[in-house]
Amino acid sequence: MNLKKYLVMGLVGLTAVTLLSTSVFAEGNSEEETVEETVEETAEVDERETTYLELSKEPILSIPEEFPRQFMYESLVNIDYPEDGVKGIFFTGGTAASERLHELTDLLNSTALNSMVIDVKDDDGTIVMDLDSDHEYVQEFTRGYVNAEELMHHLEENNIYPIARIVIFKDSRLAKARPDLSFTDDNGEVWSNRAGASFVNPYEREVWEHNVEVAKQAAALGFRDIQFDYVRFPEGFASMDEQLNYSRGDYGESGSDNVQQRVDAVTDFIAYAREELKPYGVDLSVDIFGFSALVPEEPNIGQSFPRISENVDVISSMIYPSHWGPWNLGIAKPDLEPYNLVYNYMEVENEVLAALGDDAPTTRPWLQDFTASYLGAGNYMTYGDHEVSEQIRALHDHGVKEYLLWNSRSNYSEGATFDFDD
């Protein structure tokens, strides 16, 4: 039975019993005796001190912080959180549906790696596995590359911790199907970036609901961690926010400037998702630009590192050395110094998280396991076992035990040192 329906029925039943008990006369009393007793009781009441009922503004039906286990949804499989912390690799849907799944399972079974981040909704808005949902767009955008039940049972058998990657606002499928939920030019064409990708509008509540429905169904499958990626506006949005056509929903009347409206919309979506996911007993994690930890608010994309961190269980900063410009974090060519880049970054992030106190989430950064040849000669080097190990060692030297490795083709440096506590 639906939890809210269960609670409402309980309240109605309680009210009915209360009304009934106050309207029945004492058995055996005559009408005259009853009237006399009522007069005497009224006199006694008049002598008592008047008391007042205090009105609470809190909702009668709200989801508690600690959700009772008996009311949580049962998932398809149950996989425990790794005792030594999450040490994971990224999987595309195509990889999860191929023989590479078994090859990389062997890698996890033979090393300190223990977790897989698997696409459920990918970068163009495709849902790669069948979900038990009657939501219109979930059904329309589903392509059943992956047999979800087989995958989850495989992970359970191998004790691999499953993390569902759900790309949120980068979503060409939904943008093209519903231009009114996206950003359009004066000709009514949906805006796309240089790579041809379109985004949907973070101000739109319907976009929130679509993505949270995907998250709920992933949780029902047994994914223990729901990881949101691209929880942001398009890069460089501040330079086009007044040129494109789009709704600002309730935020347009807030009186805040454009930057603050973007930050509020992104943060509010994450808080909404966390509340909706409570009955599923999962962790909520968010991927975020590492640069966001260096500034109070990232003005283009609407990410505030502290505000997002307050609303998630895990924060996963993308701190790939290749993604930093010259002299960022005091390093002339960051891709050439993987240890120093990660070490210097963690100095900053740890300070930001420490300021949050008990509200601070677990940190689980994304590390680089790919070669950034696009940076040009002299600005990059080939990444392999040593370079991956150096990044993990830098985290270890800051007391950080959790991390995720990114390679878009799921080709990982199998000889790296994945745990410096061994």
Image (cartoon, rainbow, N blue to C red):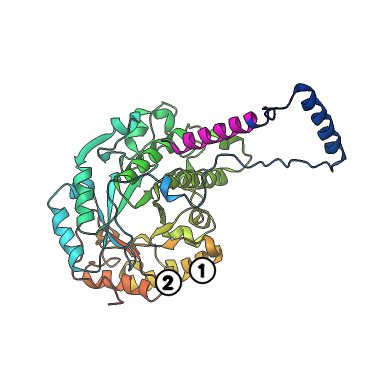
**Residue 218 as seen in the image, left or right of residue 309:** left
Quadrant location of the N terminus in the rendered image: top left
* 227 sits to left or right of 24: left
The residue shown at (40%, 74%) is: 399
Q: Secondary structure at mark 2?
A: helix
Asked if the stretch drawn in magenta spans residue 11, the answer is yes
Q: Dot 2: few (<14), some (14–19), or many (≥20) neighbours within 10 Å?
A: some
Q: How far separated are the C-alphas under marks 1 and 2?
A: 12 Å
Point out which mark residue 351 bears: 1
202 is within the stretch colored magenta: no
The numbered mark, 1 or 2, whose residue comes first in the sequence reads 2
Tell me which corner region of the image, top left, top right, bottom left or bottom right, holds residue 200. Answer: top left
**Amino acid type shown at disc 2:** Asn
Circle 1: is it few (<14), some (14-19), or many (20+) Cα within 10 Å? few
Image check: 108 left or right of 323? left
Name the residue carrying label 2. 344
Q: Position of residue 102 (x, y in %)?
A: 14, 56
Q: Determine the main secondary structure of the stretch shown in magenta.
A: helix
Quadrant of the image occupied by residue 34: top right
322 or 176, which lies in front? 176
Identify which residue is drawn at 38% across, 32% down.
Answer: 190
Q: Which residues are magenta?
A: 1-20
Q: Quadrant of residue 40?
A: top right
